[in-house]
Amino acid sequence: MGKTLFEKIWDKHVITQRDDGDVLLYIDRHLTHDLHFRSFGKLKEKGLKIRCPEQLYGTPDHSVPTTAKVLSDIPEGEMRETVEVLAQAADEHGFHHFPMTDERHGIVHVVGPEQGITLPGLTLVCGDSHTSTHGALGCLAFGIGSTEVQHVLATQTLWQRKPKSMRINVTGTLGTGVSGKDVILAVIRKISAAGGTGYAIEYAGSAIDNMSMEGRMTICNMTIEAGARSGLVAPDDKTIDYCKGRPFAPEGVKWDQAVAYWKTLCSDADAVFDKEVTLDAESIAPMVTWGNSPQYALGVHELVPDPELEPDPITRAEMVAALDYMDLKPGMRLSDISVDTVFIGACTNSRIEDMRAAAAVAKGRHAKARTLVVPGSGLVKKQAEAEGLDKIFIEAGMEWREPGCSMCIAMNGDMLAPGERAASTSNRNFRGRQGPGSRTHLVSPAMAAAAAVCGHFADVRDFVV
Amino acid sequence: MEAFKTFASVAVPIDIPNCDTDQIIPARFLRRAADDPDYHSFLFADLRFEKDGSDTEFVLNQGPYRAGKIFVADINWGCGSSRENAVTALTANGIRSVIAPSFGDIHYSNCIKNGVLPVPLSVEDCATLRAQIRESPGAEIAIDLETQSLTGPDQTTYVFEINAFDKHRLLNGLDDVELTLEFDTQIDSFELIYKTENDWAY
């Protein structure tokens, strides 16, 4: 029996296996950010050192205000402290660090692929659940907790249990105005927010083959919202082109060796998956979530569902609670739901393609709701400005900000007021995620821009862009 | 880490399917130190407290449930963010076990590493237990990790699954890093060969 892509990468990194099946896995790359600022002190308390500082890469993202350009712009207190401590630790231990004054700085899951830190065939971890993003490059990447962060710092390894395998095939061709974000929301709706728990997911099929690297990253990013710690796309020519010439990518002979290896990284034709799921790309419409779990997603022309029609009592109760929290009624049209704020950004959708998609809708129009556009890194910002996208946003009355996690997690001062409703390109519509009492609807960048210029949800396919 | 052998306590029904770690601890507390004396109040902060700090009607504020150290939850408990702070918020309140039909993978792992026992039982068994402890507030559940069994308020015994390594770690309160450092020589030799064979990555 052949191997899956996941197994090929996994097997190559197994140092030893215990009788109960757990393996000690070697970790190639460890990414970190400001929220793990306490890790370094804790390690020291235990008398431990960072085993491989050259394999550790840090950048502040969660606590950085999107109006701040330098450290002193961050309000004094715990926000500034996290950023300061990360910088001091980088100096002390000698790991790679992209401070906020460095144009390479940004959201850790945007920076990794952009810098060529993330490469096919590697294992990569970060103390952040959206580490699954990096799987879009054929890299085995998953989020870990802070005890595991300590473990990787000290040993460059992790004890892991091999997950089951699932392949999600998205066949056919996506329609105009339908993006990776809509695909992953349709996937989560189909398999549920727990459907991927205990699995590693591989995405395949013609719609994935034809998708940009940015779109694949969006899909892998939200794999954790389906419960799976990691999502993978087999590296192809597009992946190789994407990696070529990136600052931390190999060069010369090493590049040729890498490419030769990467070309072997696909699931064998006779590999067997524990579960296979197929979605028809043509059936996927631009999506909008209505509840407090990403599984509660609707095609833009569907109506807010009626819990009375739901046979499962657990789901029914959850739907009733969500309608109440979100202040929605069964049978409402999505276009009748007005938004107070629009957020375009987060590790899900803050890459150059996302900026372009939002700008294409915003161009020549005017925002009817407060709109924050937050590029994922200094380099995305620079590229967008070189293309004049910043001017399009500003002329549309939107705010063009500095890179960071921003309103996705609302830890940097960007947040919603209680009861405020947002169209957001982030990944979680959990209660209070964007501030206590906040109401979040997840959408693609183009759909977010459409909501901004209409003041309510609208079908981006109706826009001539 | 505190070892887990047997534990009995008043059990609390948490009737929230897909209870994400943002509910268990909102993000605004994530920069706080684990020894912050207020840490216990971060658990379910937005569900437990009104804006003025007064108690809501959330189950943890009701009579005998205030003393509960075991949660009986619903599907996909602890999904979402990898924040280990969610487990710190549990341990700050003395919570030693969460019984649920399914768990977020990262949260499950975080629990094991902090002496909190995740107990997977079927959807039906969890619903039965929640109904019993709702009907008799203050009813207790007893857990024995060695025998992988749990006794409900009506003395019904349930058997649960746990990986042998996780069980060993919890029973003995073992710290992972110390355990792994015993493999130091093996890691060194693996690393040497691996980096030579894959020097494109280094």
Image: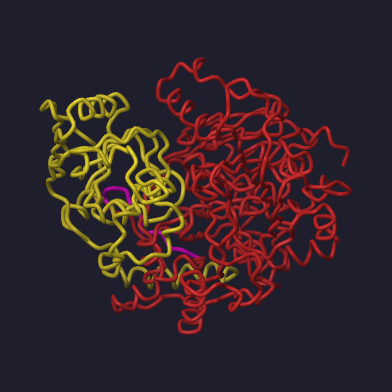
Quadrant of the snapshot with the C terminus of chain A: top right
Q: Which chain is yellow?
A: B
Q: B163 or A424, which is in the foreground?
A: A424
User: Could you say which quadrant of the image residue A157 lies in?
Assistant: bottom left
User: Could you say which quadrant of the image residue A146 lies in?
Assistant: bottom left
User: Which residue: 29% across, 37% down?
Assistant: B59
Q: Do we see residue A371 in this rendering?
A: yes
User: Could you say which quadrant of the image residue A172 lies in?
Assistant: top right
User: Which residue: 64% across, 64% down?
Assistant: A66
Left or right: B187, with B13 as reference point: right
Q: A264 or A123, which is in the foreground?
A: A123
Q: A231 or A388, which is in the foreground?
A: A388
User: Residue B85 placed where, x, y %?
Assistant: 37, 57
Which residues are drawn in magenta?
A19-29
User: Residue A9 placed where, x, y %?
Assistant: 51, 54
Residue A26 located within the stretch drawn in magenta: yes
